[in-house]
Structures are given as C-alpha cells and as structure tokens.
Image (cartoon, helix red, strand yellow):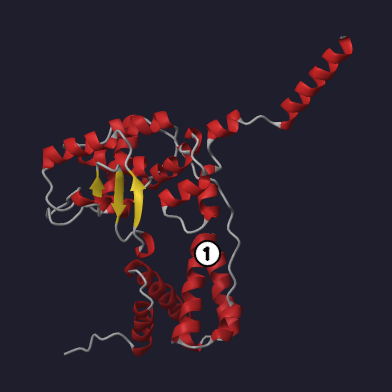
Amino acid sequence: MKDERPPPLRQRMIEDMRIRGMAEKTQAAHIRAVRDVALFLKRSPDTATPEELRACQLQMTNAGMTATTFNVRIVSLRFFFGVTCGRDERKRHMQFRRAPRKLPAVPSIEEVGDILAAAPGPGLKYRAALGISHGAGLRAAEVCHLRVQDIDGERMIIHVEAGKAGRDRKAMLSPGLPDLRRDCWREARPAGRLFPGLPRVNPISPRQLNRAFASARHMAGVTRSATLHTLRHSFATHLPETGSDVRGIQVLLGHTKLTTTARCTHVATKTIRNTVGPFERLKDLQDLTLRRGLE
C-alpha cells in the first residue's frame, strides 16, 4: 500500500504551526506558499540560496501579484526558514512590499437598509444574519457560528466566542435586532446554532452568507462596490456619526490595534461634513474684524 504520510520537512512545519495554535486556513496558506517555492526551485525549498530567493520574489512581482498576497507569501517563507529550518539568516533576504493604503468602500446607511430589506428567503434567516453583521460589526464567520445562548437580550449584548485569533469578546446588540432575531427564531426554531445550515446541526457557511449578501445587493440595485465584510466597515463608519469615540469602536470590533479602527472611521462622511475647517474660521474672523472697523 502506498505510504501517504507527509514528507518529513512538511510534517515538521505542520507541527510547528500546530504548536503555535495557528488556524487551519493559515496553515494551508503557509504550506501552499512553501510548495510554490519548491515548484519554482524544482527541489526541496530548504536548499534555496539567497539569489534563488531573490529570483523567486522577482518572479512573483513580474507575475503581477498584489502587495497583500506578496507579503502573505513572505510571512509564510520567513516562518518556514526561521522556525522550521532554523535558518534566521535567510529571513533578511525576503523583504516586504509596501502596500497602498486605500480606504474601504462603504455604502450609505440608506443603501444598507435597502440591502437588508432585499435579503433573500426563504424566511428571515439571511435578513437577520446580515442585520447582525451590520448592527454588531461582526465578521462573517462570527455571525455564522453564533448560538442561541450567545444573544443576551436583557443586557443587549452578543457574546462572540472564539472570534479572530481565538479571542472572545462582547459585541453590542442594537435595539432593533432582538425583534428580528426573535421572529427568525419563532420561524425556524433553531436548537443550537442561531443560523443553522444543512444538516441543521451545522451552522451556515460564510460562503452561503456572502452569496446571500451579493444577491441582496443586486436586488436592491446598489451599484457601489461592496462585499459582506463591507457591512462590518459600515458599522465602524456610521458609529462616529452618532458620537461614539474610536477607542470604544475598537473594543466593539475586536481590533488589537487602534490604527486599524481609525482607518475604518476615516470615511465617516457626516463627521467630515460637520467639521469646521480653518478657512471658515478665518472668514468669520475677517468678518468680525470688518464689523468692528465699521463701528
């Protein structure tokens, strides 16, 4: 019988990642990046020379790889050489590429309302799921894995268990969501997961929720470029317009860095419109000076 065990080097890398508690998707991305280097070299990747690593990075650049994907590959290779191979000196031959800092495209509150109203059926499941994504600023996977007991209607909070990087946190439950969630529960009677999939013991998948969002956006006639994650950005963008501070929004979103939250809040249009600029203040000062001169 054919031996299907992973090669020793690959197995060691998998074990190194498991020791550090990396998510399965992260592990798969790291393995894929190292495998591509092996295909480029046509031999074991741990034998790569500095010049070959340089040639590999040049090949990725010439292939039109985005800065984000490029940097993810570099993280994978630095982990492979630094941790699995114990060759830290190779890491200095792999440089990150500067990525352009673009602001996220965020629909208006009216467009979000149209998308939620157009959420596909049957029933209220997808409308409630998309509503929680926007109303609580949850990630797609966090919405999909919500349980019935995670919703605390009395204290108006949502308990997010094992979110990104395995962190638990508390999220806000908007006043309009309990009624929608209650109607959804009465309709489907979920016993475990708030939004069950097929079979019902499993939650719906983020892919299902993404398809539901795309269908709702199309039915609502919203032409602005948007994805399901845009609802989370909308949550962060619309909160400053109600007077919330950035630090509070950071806690609600579960961001580890304040700069990540600040990037989302930069597009709060109402905040921008209501800010009095220096030109207006200068004009007011000139008008005041002129009036005093006339007196």
Q: Residue at x 20, y 41 (%)?
A: 125
Residue 212 higher or lower than 27, as above or below: above
Q: Nearer the viewer, residue 262 or 211?
A: 262
Q: Where is the C terminus found, in terms of image quarters?
A: top right
Q: Nearer the viewer, residue 91 or 124?
A: 124
Residue 257 higher or lower than 14, as above or below: above
Q: Residue at x 41, y 49 (%)?
A: 252
Count of residue discs: 1
Q: Secondary structure at mark 1?
A: loop
Q: Position of residue 216 (x, y in %)?
A: 30, 36
Q: In the rendered image, which quarter is residue 31 located in?
A: bottom left
Q: Residue furthest top?
A: 295
The residue labelled by disc 1 is 63
Q: In this image, 250 relative to 51: left or right? A: left
Q: Residue at x 44, y 81 (%)?
A: 38
Q: Where is the N terminus found, in terms of image quarters?
A: bottom left
Q: Position of residue 23 (x, y in %)?
A: 34, 69
Residue 176 shows up from this direction: yes
Q: Amino acid at mark 1?
A: Ala
Q: In this image, 200 relative to 115: left or right? A: left
Q: In this image, 201 relative to 128: left or right? A: left
Q: Residues within 10 Å of mark 1 (few under 14, many from 20)?
A: few
Residue 42 shows up from this direction: no
Q: Nearer the viewer, residue 83 or 289?
A: 289
Q: Residue at x 55, y 54 (%)?
A: 259
Q: Residue furthest right?
A: 293
Q: Position of residue 5 (x, y in %)?
A: 26, 86
